[in-house]
Image (cartoon, rainbow, N blue to C red):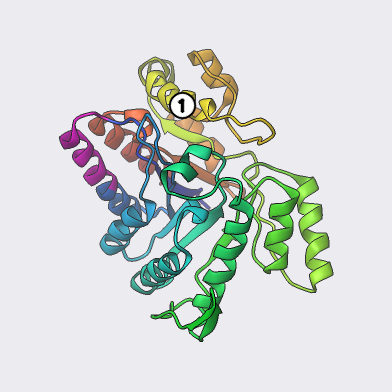
Amino acid sequence: MRAQATLRLNMTGLSEDPANEAERYRAAIEMAVYAEERGFQTVNLEEHHCAENGWLPAPLTLAAMIIARTKRVRVNIGALLVTLYDPIRLAEDIAILDLVSGGRFSFVAGLGYRPVEYHATGRSWPDRGQLMDECLETLLQAWSGKPFEYRGEKIRVTPSPVSRPHPFFMVGGMSPVAARRAARLGLPFHPPTERPDLEAIYRDELARQGKQGLYVSPGKGNTMLVVDEDPQAAWQELAPYFLRELQEYSSWKQEGVPRPGEDAVHSVEDLREQARFTILDAADFRLRFQGSASGSAVVHPLAGGIPIARGWQILERFADALT
């Protein structure tokens, strides 16, 4: 049994030249097509706004492009910042993605943790909890295909998605409120780090509500893997790109909002200690990720602006090591 393979695309490493950015986005789509051909299970996208290093701001658009070019691979957004969208338009967009993909689209519904993203999209940061409740409740009603009361008027959202009872999604979050919200709506709960305390709150609330649910454990997190014949040399070559991504991510740290991989990193040694990226040769990769308990393996070939040609090499070596 081989590892469950995921291609991560978040488009970090902004180039100030739009022509270079165009090439990177086209390469990302082609990489998704290649990943499907090589048997990957998932392409995972993300969402952030006003990032200095160009974090993907339009994941639904990129998801649609990838879905149009593929037939089997699941396209997931983890996380989709649903509070930044108009709920009805979001329900319509996701319904179309679900129809065209045949149910291959999924997402983690995120609240977000950066006030600037709310400001930039015209949303109220203090009202984010209320916005989350309204959005999730509206999505579930809209996807039923039946008329429902929305802000004082009866409406019906069309078309209906093919997935029943609705497109698959999980509720993200790192608070008791998030755990109870997911349970109240009977939705899967997926915090970004392992939190037994939140799992207990979630399950208690499910029992209180008389609902079934699913707690999805992130395990040890989403370590990104590079396969290279010379790991030591690859660390020196790729560390600046890894640092470029992780240093911006860690700069978003918010007091009281723990996130995986938010510790400051300044060197190759810091990178290795944090273990968000791991570089292995092919033999070590196969020892670690093949067998009855092979687990999940994630490759992030364009991290921090890694040159496209090098990104292709990273992806191809990773795919070869899976076989």
Which residue occupies the foreground of this view, 177 or 282? 177
Q: Does the magenta stretch include residue 213?
A: no
Q: Which residue is drawn at 30% across and 57% down?
A: 66
**How far across and down, in percent of the image, does residue 54 sit?**
35, 35
Q: Which residue is drawn at 48% across and 76% down?
A: 163
Which residue occupies the foreground of this view, 227 or 284? 227
Quadrant hosting residue 157: bottom left
- The residue carrying mark 1 is 248
**Drawn side of residue 116 relative to residue 255, left or right:** left
**Drawn side of residue 125 relative to residue 73, left or right:** right
**Drawn side of residue 315 relative to residue 123, left or right:** left
In this rendering, is residue 100 above or below 31?
below
Say whether residue 180 is visible: yes
Which residue occupies the foreground of this view, 3 or 214? 214
- Outermost residue to the left: 19
Q: Considering the whole magenta stretch, tell me its main secondary structure.
A: helix
**How far across and down, in percent of the image, does residue 296 sit?**
54, 46
- Outermost residue to the front: 152
**Element on which disc 1 rests:** helix
Quadrant hosting residue 230: top left
In this rendering, is residue 173 above or below 279?
below
**How far across and down, in percent of the image, does residue 142 sit?**
50, 76
Q: Which residue is drawn at 41% across and 72% down?
A: 95
Look at the image and give the residue range highlighted in magenta: 15-28
Q: Residue at x 53, y 30 (%)?
A: 252
**How far across and down, in percent of the image, does residue 233 sit?**
38, 15
**Drawn side of residue 257 relative to residue 15, left or right:** right
Say whether residue 290 is visible: no
Q: How crowded is mark 1: few (under 14 residues within 10 Å), some or many (20 or more)?
A: some
Q: What residue type is labelled 1?
A: Glu
Which residue occupies the foreground of this view, 14 or 127? 127
